Amino acid sequence: MPLTLKHQLLAAGGVLALAAGGVVVAVLLQPTDTTREPVSASPHESFLHLATDTMAVSGGHWTFDDKTTPFSAREALNDKPQECLSDSSTEQYDLSLFGPATYDPLKTIDTMTRHWQALDYSVRTVADTGDAIEITAAVPDSSEIGYFASTGTTSITVQGPCVKSAPTSARFCFRARARDRSGNRAERNGHRILQTCRTVAPSGVPANHRAGMPACP
């Protein structure tokens, strides 16, 4: 539908003149702000973007490391981080994908190298046999990504940075004033405090409660 003068003024911000009974009324039209705040990606989504971006440049059909299951970003987001070999108290995301063969590995690698360098990745060649070339890159967020191209197959490997493992559970102390059998609060030298300790997921306890909880034995 073609834009009317009113629509154009609404979009750009301007003055709309209205004539009524011989009187011209100027109406100031404010521009409509259609921008949205960018949505922050989670560490896992940022990690996964390294792979999807590389696949987009390479092109073709990609599978998970079983070489059968088609790649799915939704499925990949279900992966859990793995324990880092260098430090058992840390964990990292890792992903391996396989794609189609390339008839010109040198050209394919050159295209990927220039793309990564444009993203400020530090790129180096790992192996080059002519019909099979492998490069790897250090990403500014400390992730590493590798790309292998050959006349037989292509592959992508991504490893995220090692970070401290998130606790899956912790012991928290819950306090409550004792009540007598009738349900009324019991009084004995003031309110009698009962304390119980339970192992629960940290997410199950509000942060403001966690801050004031004493340590459990």
Image: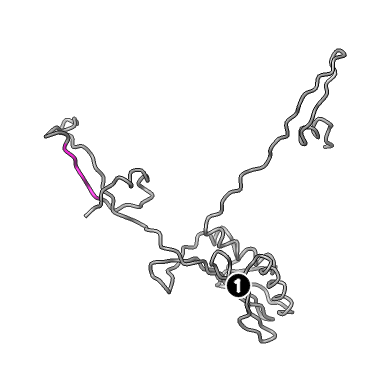
Q: Quarter of the image containing the N terminus? A: top right
Amino acid under disc 1: Ala
25 sits left or right of 99 in the view: right
153 up-or-down from 21: above or below: below
Residue 193 lies in the magenta stretch: yes
The reply, left or right, for residue 80 in relation to residue 190 is right
- Residue shown at 43% from the left, 74% from the top: 85
Percent of width and height locating residue 117:
67, 69
Q: Name the residue under label 1.
A: 137
Dot 1 alpha-carbon crowd within 10 angstroms: few under 14, some 14 to 19, many 20 or more = many
Q: Coloring scheme of the render?
A: one colour
Residue at (83%, 35%) from the top-left corner? 3
Residue at image location 84% in from the left, 31% down from the top: 5
Residue 172 left/right relative to 159:
left
Which SS class for mark 1?
Answer: strand
With respect to residue 140, does 19 lie above or below?
Answer: above
Residue 163, image quadrant: bottom left
- Residue 187 image position (x, y, % from top left): 14, 32
In front: 156, or 143? 143
Magenta stretch bounds? 192-197
Image coords of residue 8 (percent x, y): 81, 35
Q: Relative to 58, is 184 above or below?
A: above
Which residue is the extreme one toward the left? 188
Front-lying residue, 8 or 212? 212
Number of marks in the image? 1
Q: Quadrant of residue 149?
A: bottom right
**Residue in front for this viewpoint, 195 or 215:** 215
Left/right placement of residue 38 relative to residue 131 reads left
Q: In which quarter of the image is residue 109?
A: bottom right
Q: Position of residue 70 (x, y in %)?
A: 60, 66
